[in-house]
Image: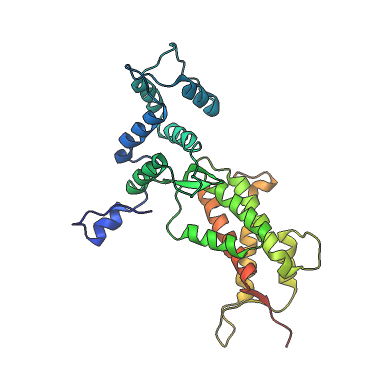
Amino acid sequence: MSVWRPWDTDDNEHEERSLIRELLPASLQAPAMAWIRRQLHPSGPYGNVDMNRVHALQSALQVDFRLQSRFIAADDMVRAITQKGNQFIARVIDYFLSGFETDQWGTTPNEAETLKWHFDSAASAAEIALQDGAYRLRRRATEGVEELAEASRQSAPALAGQHLGKAWNEAYALTPNTSLAMTEAIKAVEAAAHPVVTPTAKKVRLGMMTQTIKDQSGWTLAFPNRDDGHPDHKAVLVGMLETLIIAQVDRHGGVAPSVMEAHGHVQLASILVQWFSSGVIVREPAA
């Protein structure tokens, strides 16, 4: 996130300006609604909206604007969207964004780039990102976290990387499926751990691989410890794996995880995927 910095701000003020805020901060309201108005394609002398765009929006978002006229002024349409609240405004933005794609040189369309600048500068809790070839609105991750995800995907086997990518997309979506995010995160770790822990076995669940590590000697992390053996790297690894498994309580009929829980779950899975894929998790031969 790149927040524009006035020339006379000190570090403390810039840090305050950079704090991630609500979905649509007050300073973002006007430019966001002006952007939506442009996407409605007002045309003609009276500024009426393109009704094909409105009808497509109604079908996609499954909402009835109760339009009583064949001709709707753009300002009236914007007012109807605004009255439905910030979450709905964000969905409208997300819908229109999904129609933008990069060109053959990978250049971001001006309309998407302009809106991205406003969301970043206002320190919105959402950001504009390219996902599966289209631009979408998603929850903003703390700076550095997304780099961890990308590094994990790049270092992981193809299947693990695919599952991890799906987990991140679901966890940070505007309307996240937290249960699916956790399921995909666990599948990613299973795919990364399988060739390390149980290379000769057929597909094995994460719980079984965790039990294998607990039962076998020599499992550790490629980090130094003290002469007294502290920290116990095997215990750290097992704790991380069991935390990942036990957190998915809705798998057995429990309450669906919160967005915060899903974020932490996917971040933990990313670390484990990277560790299994890069050789940080090893089994030392018996002495």
Q: Where's residue 195, x and y in %?
A: 73, 67
30 vs 194: above or below: above
* Left or right of residue 11: residue 217: right
* Residue nearer the viewer, 62 or 209: 62
Q: Where's residue 176, x and y in %?
A: 54, 43
Q: Where's residue 91, x and y in %?
A: 47, 34
User: Can residue 22 be seen?
Assistant: no
27 vs 157: above or below: above
Which quadrant of the structure image shows residue 217?
bottom right
Question: Which residue sits at x=69%, y=60%?
Answer: 190
The scheme the figure's colours follow is: rainbow
Counting every numbered tag in the picture gives 0
* Residue nearer the viewer, 50 or 211: 50
* Left or right of residue 259: residue 44: left
* Left or right of residue 135: residue 232: right
Which quadrant of the structure image shows residue 133?
top right
Which quadrant of the structure image shows residue 112?
top left
Q: Where's residue 57, x and y in %?
A: 50, 26
Q: On the rendered image, what quadrant is the C terminus found in? A: bottom right
105 vs 46: above or below: below
* Residue nearer the viewer, 71 or 234: 71
* Residue nearer the viewer, 287 or 94: 94
Question: Which residue sits at x=56%, y=51%?
Answer: 168
Q: Residue furthest left?
A: 8
Q: Residue furthest front?
A: 104
User: Can residue 279 be seen?
Assistant: yes
Q: Residue furthest right?
A: 201
